[in-house]
Amino acid sequence: MTTPPQFVLSLLSRQLYLEFRAKAKSKDFAFVRFRDFLPGAAPLPRRYIVLRHDIDFSPNYSLEMAELERERGISSTPQRC
């Protein structure tokens, strides 16, 4: 699968992603998964961000993103398109 033309991956970078995460954490946002909205899940934090990665557009980077998130204790939901 190739990246659709409306998605400009060249604008994304590892550094920009790291800065986004750091800024979110500094403003007391927690990262949650979609499953955290299911019945019976723990209460959501006051401020949160739900991350979803469409890994079909750039599967080569999905492992690196998962490792970066794990290092910082961030959860996300991988999504196949």
Image (tube, rainbow, N blue to C red):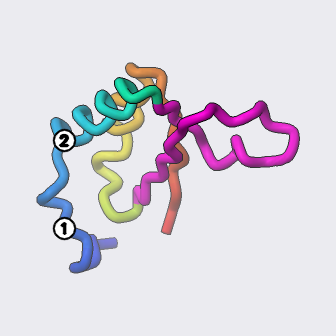
The residue carrying pointer 1 sits among few (fewer than 14), some (14 to 19) or many (20 or more) residues within 10 Å by Cα, namely few
Instruction: Give, as a three-letter code, the residue at label 1.
Output: Val
- Please state which of residues 21 and 27 is positioned toward the viewer in this rendering: 27
Q: Which mark is residue 8?
A: 1
Residue 58 lies, in percent from the top left, at 30, 58
Q: How many marks?
A: 2
Kindly state the secondary structure of the residue where label 2 is placed: helix
Question: Is residue 44 found inside the magenta-colored segment of the image?
Answer: yes
Residue placed most toward the observer, 63 or 16 = 16
- Name the residue rendered at 85%, 46% in the picture: 39
- Read off the residue under disc 2: 16
Q: Which mark is residue 43?
A: none
Lower position in the chain sequence, tag 1 or tag 2: 1
Q: Are marks 1 and 2 in contact (CB under 8 Å)?
A: no
Residue shown at 12%/59% (left/top)?
10
Quadrant of the image occupied by residue 40: top right
Quadrant of residue 48 within the rendered picture? top right
Residue 32 lies within the magenta run? yes
Q: Nearer the viewer, residue 72 or 3?
A: 72
The local secondary structure at tag 1 comes to loop
Among all residues in the image, which is located at the extreme bottom?
5
Q: CA distance from mark 1 to mark 2?
A: 14 Å
Q: Which residues are magenta?
A: 29-55
Residue type pointed to by label 2: Leu
Name the residue: 37% across, 34% down.
24
